[in-house]
Image (cartoon, grey):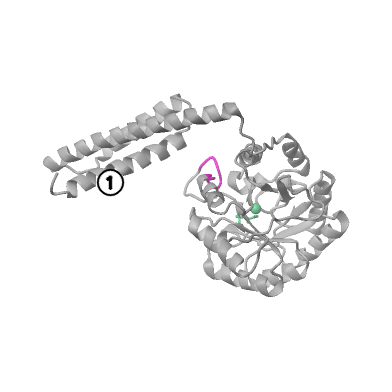
Amino acid sequence: MENLQPIIFPGIDPAKPLIIAGPCSAETRSQVLDTASQLAATGIKIFRAGIWKPRTKPGGFEGIGSEGLEWLREVRETTGMYTSTEVANHRHVEEALNAGIDIIWIGARTSANPFAMQEIADTIASINPDATVLVKNPVNPDLELWVGALQRIYNAGVRRLGAIHRGFSTYGKHLYRNMPQWHIPIELRLRYPNLPIICDPSHIGGKRELIAPLSQQAMDMGFNGLIVESHCNPDCAWSDASQQITPEILNFILNTLVVRDSKQTTESLTLLRQQIDRIDNELLEILSRRMGVSRDIGRYKKEHRMPVVQAGRYNDIIRSRVKLGEEMGMSAEFMKTVLLAIHDESVRQQIEIINDRNV
Ligand code: PEP
Ligand code: MN
């Protein structure tokens, strides 16, 4: 993806983060036009609304369908905003592009499906390769699948291409609806520095109160913009009610966002980074010492024909260390991730010892 073109629209300052806002779903003509006019009044320039909604279970609101395209046309005419919607198959692409939608995005359930991505890429290429296309990360934390989805669109000839980070699903209840796993979009940025990446705090957080901190975090991490769900009456939304905010609250959040210049590196920051480098070296030395002890334990277990993993000991370690870590100001979630990773590596090293006839 060498020849990407920037996503620029007349009337939108390319030096500022790209902001897209609007309801999860287009529900009624008046809800769409009401929300759009309130957003436009606060200076939002790109409107979003889903008209074909991929729902987890049948029986929910599956989107208003093609009729919503007419409402989006009215939004464009009455407010001057650009419009965007989600597409999931060739018919959606055809209808959306022919209706003059300015940005189409591919949702997380679709970007996980290479057949659907190829069909969408081919259809965009045949109708308008100059279209602006955003690809959400697939639901599962698989960077290669995300890259593959982007490459299918790029290889079809689309150059105004961007990515949306909307978090990754996991089993069970967590603080976030979809885990941010920030290292994945960061890896994408390192591989493709010219690919704009927009953050979707609504689908990551799943809750209104997380929109502001996640948006700020995205700005601090150098994301190129935000796509936020905003509804004129969030409590009554037909989908994703708990994560939608009013245009007024969105305006407040955007006005309080601190957007830093990512290229500015002051002298004191350099000093702090040197400190981090030193601490990381110490961390690695300590980790490698710990693995050395693990290998000694492995030799002992081998000699005494003991199993590598002893569940009781393992649970005790995790429980006590998570508690200690929390007392030191780190989240339980973070502590569990780190400890499990260390434990996995210890087990791997012990198994190596046990299988090695020379030890
Ligand atoms: C959406 O943007 O409303 C949506 C369905 O998002 P995702 O594909 O990220 O779940
Ligand atoms: Mn939604």
The secondary structure making up most of the magenta span is: loop
Disc 1: residue Cβ within 8 A of ligand 1's nearest atom: no
Q: Quadrant of the N terminus?
A: bottom right
Name the foreground residue: 8 vs 346.
8
Q: Is residue 275 left or right of residue 96?
A: left
Could you say where residue 168 lies in the image, as x and y percent from the top left?
Answer: 52, 50
- In this figure, which residue is indicated by the disc labeled 1? 348
Check the image and report above or below for 252 versus 75: above
Residue farthest to the front?
A: 267
Check the image and report above or below for 155 versus 42: below
Q: Secondary structure at mark 1?
A: helix
Residue 110 at least partly seen:
no
Check the image and report above or below for 197 versus 250: below
Could you say where residue 34 lies in the image, as x and y percent from the top left?
Answer: 82, 51
Please report the bounds of the magenta region as a residue range: 174-182
Check the image and report above or below for 200 versus 110: above
Which amino acid does the dot numbered 1 rest on?
Answer: Arg
Could you say where residue 131 lies in the image, as x and y percent from the top left?
Answer: 71, 65
**In which image quadrant can residue 29 be found?**
bottom right
Q: Does residue 71 belong to the magenta stretch?
A: no
**In which image quadrant can residue 64 be found?**
bottom right
Name the foreground residue: 68 vs 120.
120
Q: Quadrant of the C terminus?
A: top left
Could you say where residue 277 lies in the image, as x and y percent from the top left?
Answer: 46, 32
Residue at 81% over, 45% down: 43
Name the foreground residue: 291 vs 344.
291
Residue farthest to the bottom?
A: 126
